[in-house]
Amino acid sequence: MKNHQMVTKLYTSATKNILLGVPIILLFAVRGVDIDISDRFNIHSAKVLAQTPSKIAAKSSLASQIIITEVLYHETGQGASGNDEFIEIYNTSSSAVNLSGWKLGNSNLIANVKDSTGGITGNASSPAYIFPKDTVLRPKEYAVIWIGNNTPHHQADDAAWQIWLGQRPKLNNDGDDIWLYDERSQIVDYIAYGAGLAIDTLPAASLNLWNNTYQSSLTTDKGQSISLANIVSDLNSSACWEPTNSARKSISSIASNRCPNYTKPVDTDDRGNTLTSAGKSNYNIALNPSPSPQPQATATPTSTPQPSPETAATSTPQSSSSVITASNI
């Protein structure tokens, strides 16, 4: 016991600011660890590191598999019921991905930077939404996270699943950023738009998560989302983002002249007065295409009866209608 008391004294003397005078012998007696004076600082350091989450930004190994594909930040109404802000994510891979414990927010959690208006969950001290256990996104599926309430206008019928956070508008209309983290708080995807103080410190350039060259041009009208214009190979660049149905915006905000493998995002959402495509592909869409000629069957009758004037019929031509076709991604 005398030796143990000596060890305790040495430990508390060297680490009294951390251990707050707790006899170290009690901590180790519970775990059944033999104390070696020469290793005491290594043991203590390992214990502290195990309890302290990493503050070093890292890129998740799933960064190219789950991506952010669309964001509506310029809401059409106020309050939780009128707030139609949403964030859409997509599984690009051929495997299902478990999102349990993942986080989605508009704050840099690694740098512990909180959004001044509060995070998307409505609480500035806990700014990120945490995906619940057994949340799975299957291959080529979309999911939508609505910031507002569950209302008839806040629906994504084609999404694999959707979530309603029940919050008033949280995404800044002048500029903001969206962060998607895995369960270890490693960055899966990141985008930013516009400019202003709501945009936090960007991820380190070495992570190759975002090129902000065209970020300031990603401005929209009310109820108009911004969309990724290259879903095949997300280049983590503002060059490949543009306002949905971008013909309504200036040429400076259109990605067709700056993004490889550009595919124009168009409005496929018929709910409300928005220009969005929540929960479905808005790529490779042909609006009002010219109808293809239909092949005609050819027959050689043995005899052709002639109709009498009284029984002659006149066929009514069928009116053509607008057709929207979409190819699945």
Image (cartoon, rainbow, N blue to C red):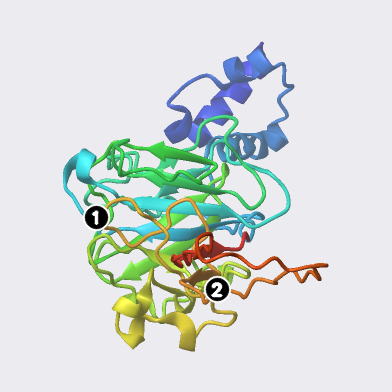
Q: From the top left corner, tell me how far across and down residue 249 is, in percent.
A: 30, 79
Q: Which residue is mark 1?
A: 75
Amino acid type at circle 1 is Glu
Can residue 202 be seen here? The reply is no
Q: Nearer the viewer, residue 282 or 113?
A: 282
Q: Is residue 256 above or below residue 96?
A: below
Q: Residue furthest top?
A: 1
Would residue 200 appear left or right of 180 to someone viewing this image?
Answer: left
Of residues 152 and 68, which is closer to you in this image?
152
For the C terminus, which image quadrant?
Answer: bottom right
| Residue behind mark 2 | 291
Is disc 1 surrounded by few (<14), some (14 to 19) or many (20+) residues within 10 Å? many
Amino acid at pointer 2: Pro
Instruction: Label 2: state its secondary structure.
Output: loop
Q: What residue do we see at 81% from left, 71% from top?
A: 300
Report the front residue among 171 and 74: 74
Mark 2 surroundings within 10 Å by alpha-carbon count, few (fewer than 14), some (14 through 19), many (20 or more): few
Count of numbered badges drawn on the protein: 2
Residue 38 spot, x, y in % from top left: 71, 36
Question: At 66% from the left edge and 11% from the top edge, which residue is drawn?
Answer: 1
